[in-house]
Amino acid sequence: MNNRIETVVASIIEGVRNALTKNDVTFDEYRQGIKYLLANAASGELALLIDVFFNTTICNIENRTIGGSTSTLEGPYYLEDAPFVDGQLKLYQHDNGEPLILRGRVTDGDSRPVVGAVIDVWHSTPDGFYGGIHKDIPADCYRGKLTTNTDGRYHVRTTLPVPYQIPHEGPTGALLESMGRHSWRPAHVHYKVRKDGFHPLTTQAYFEGGAYVDSDCCEGVFTDNIKPEVRENGIRVVEYDFNLAPAASQAVKA
Ligand code: DHB
Ligand code: FE
């Protein structure tokens, strides 16, 4: 007997029973629901379906319990073995996307710089695909590891990502469409910030005023992640400072 499984699963069952009861779901609808879930699983999209609706819930819980900067979705396209880069992410072929500078500072709970933190950065191409995942874009393009300097600072040049449409031709996209929802995420840059002794931080930057910032299909946009449109010498800059919580810390729940 596992108490945690008993508690969480009993709550899930209660939540589903309440939803069925509240909506007077018929036996036909119940059977349709089962059929849908079987078809979704058979198509290999079960993880996508669950992530679309619940990944952000887990991020919310971690944000309440861990402390440090606001974390949000990792998404399915993080690759562990991205190369260390110095000042420039590798682009693909004739990339004519808008130049973008990512920079900022990593600090600890006492606002001291975190030196030698490793920041994985990854994002879409200027036409909405990920290196090593889609088409024939090499895995070392549009992703890389940065190291913070003696002042905790990092910076790298790349090109602006665009909104990303999650796989939408299968059962998950069909479900979103029947609910009157779209399957788009706003343009975003992913970050994973790590340093021994600190809780790893996984988060994303979004672009203020950009398409879908207010209607992310994965509901992964928090106010802290929305960055204003800043230009320096005509070049877009996203300044993102990260505050790391100590490892294994559990902030007191509000
Ligand atoms: C998905 C893709 C992303 O790039 C992301 O950041 C989050 C989710 C997805 O396909 O589910
Ligand atoms: Fe993404």
Image (tube, rainbow, N blue to C red):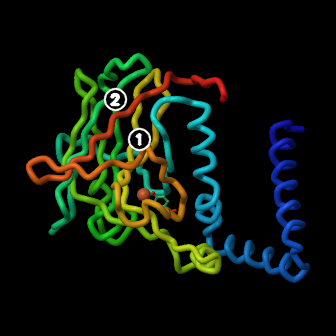
Picture quadrant where residue 32 is located: bottom right
Viewer-side label of 1, 2 = 2
- Is the C-beta of the residue carrying label 1 under 8 Å from the nearest atom of ligand 2? no
Q: Residues within 10 Å of mark 2 (few under 14, many from 20)?
A: many
Residue furthest left as drawn: 233
Task: Name the residue: 38% across, 66% down.
Answer: 211
Amino acid type, label 2 = Val
Q: Position of residue 152 (x, y in %)?
A: 28, 25
Amino acid type, label 1 = Lys
Q: Quadrant of the N terminus?
A: top right
Q: Nearer the viewer, residue 108 or 137?
A: 108
Q: Which residue in the structure is indicated by mark 2?
A: 106
Could you tell whether 69 is left or right of 15 in the image? left
Residue furthest bottom as drawn: 28
Q: Reading the chain from its start, which is encountered first: label 1 or label 2?
A: 2
Task: Name the residue: 73% across, 77% down.
Answer: 36
Could you tell whether 155 is left or right of 215 in the image? left
Q: Quadrant of the C terminus?
A: top right
State the SS at label 2.
Answer: strand
Picture quadrant where residue 15 is located: bottom right
State the SS at label 1.
Answer: strand
Could you tell whether 25 is left or right of 63 in the image? right
Above or below residue 111? Residue 140 is below
Q: Which residue in the structure is indicated by mark 1?
A: 192
Q: Position of residue 117 (x, y in %)?
A: 34, 29
Q: Nearer the viewer, residue 126 or 197?
A: 126
Q: Nearer the viewer, residue 27 or 232?
A: 232
Task: Name the residue: 67% across, 73% down.
Answer: 40
Could you tell whether 95 is left or right of 133 in the image? left
Picture quadrant where residue 54 is located: bottom right
Q: Position of residue 174 (x, y in %)?
A: 60, 79
Above or below residue 196? Residue 161 is below
